[in-house]
Amino acid sequence: MAEEPAIVVPSEFERVFRAHHGLVFRTAYRITGNAADAEDVSQTVFLRLFRREHDAMKNEESYLRRAAINAALDVIRSRQSDRTVELTDLPAEPAHDSPHNDPRELRMALGRALAQLKPRPSEIFVLRFLEGFSNAQIARMLGISQVLVAVIVYRARQQLRKELGAYRLRGTD
C-alpha cells in the first residue's frame, strides 16, 4: 500500500498562520459568538489563503481580518437558511425576566441583523464597531473613500436600527 505524499507547507504561509491565527479566531468569535464556528471560520480563511496567489500575503492582516468577517457572516447566513439551532447555542435560562435583557439573545439578534445586510455594509460595520477601526483606516484598508465609508456606516446603522427595533431602549419603558 502506497503512502500518501506529505503536504509541504511553505514557510511564508506558516509564518502568516502563526502570526495571525489568534486575530482571525477572535474576529470570527466576535461575530459568531461560538468557538466551534470561529474555528471553522479560521480553517476556511487559512485554506482560502493557502489556495490564493501571494497577493493576499502583501497586506496579510487586512486580508485575514476581512476574510474572517466575511466567512463568519457566511456562517450566520447559513444558520438562518438552515433554521436550526444547536443545543449548545441555547441559553440555559434567560438572564432576567425579559429575553430582551439577555445579552446572548441580543448578540444572536445582532448576528441575524448583520446577516441581512449586503456583504460590503456588514463588513464595514464589523470593522467599524466590532473591530474598532476608524472610517479613515477602513477606507485605506478597502481602497475606497472615507466619505463612502461614512455613508455605508450610516446606512448600515439605519438598517440595523430597524432590524433591532425591539431591543432599543428596553428597560426605559
Image: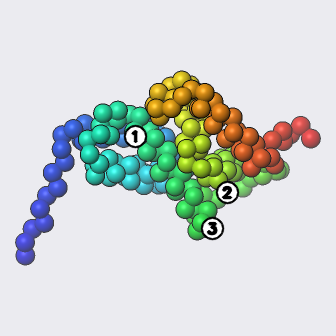
The answer to whether the residue labelled 2 contacts the one labelled 1, judged by CB atoms less than 8 Å apart, is: no
Answer few, some or many: residues within 10 Å of disc 1's Cα (few below 14, many 20 plus, some between 14 and 19).
Answer: many
Camera-side mark, 2 or 3: 3
Q: Quick one: SS at disc 1?
A: helix
Circle 2 residues within 10 Å: few <14, some 14–19, many ≥20: few
Quadrant of residue 56 within the rendered picture: top left
Q: Residue 37: percent from the left, percent from the top? A: 48, 54
| Near-viewer residue (10 or 106) | 10
Residue extending farthest bottom: 1
Q: Position of residue 154 (x, y in %)?
A: 69, 34
Mark 2: secondary structure: loop
Q: CA distance from mark 3 to mark 1?
A: 28 Å
Residue placed under numbered mark 1 in the picture: 64
Mark 3 lies on residue: 83
- Measured as percent of width and height from the top left, residue 31 is found at 56, 45
On the question of residue 96 being in view, the answer is no
Amino acid residing under circle 3: Arg
Query: Secondary structure beneath disc 3?
Result: loop
User: For mark 2, what is the residue?
Assistant: 92
Quadrant of the rendering where the C terminus is positioned? top right
Which of discs 3 and 1 lies nearer the camera? The answer is 1
Q: Gap between marks 2 and 3, in whole Å?
A: 20 Å
Earlier residue among tags 3 and 1: 1
Left or right of residue 11, residue 91 in this image: right
Alpha-carbon span between mark 2 and mark 1? 34 Å
Residue at point 65% right, 33% down? 151
Amino acid type indicated by mark 1: Leu
The one nearer the camera, 111 or 36, is 111
Residue beneath the point at 89% across and 37% down: 172
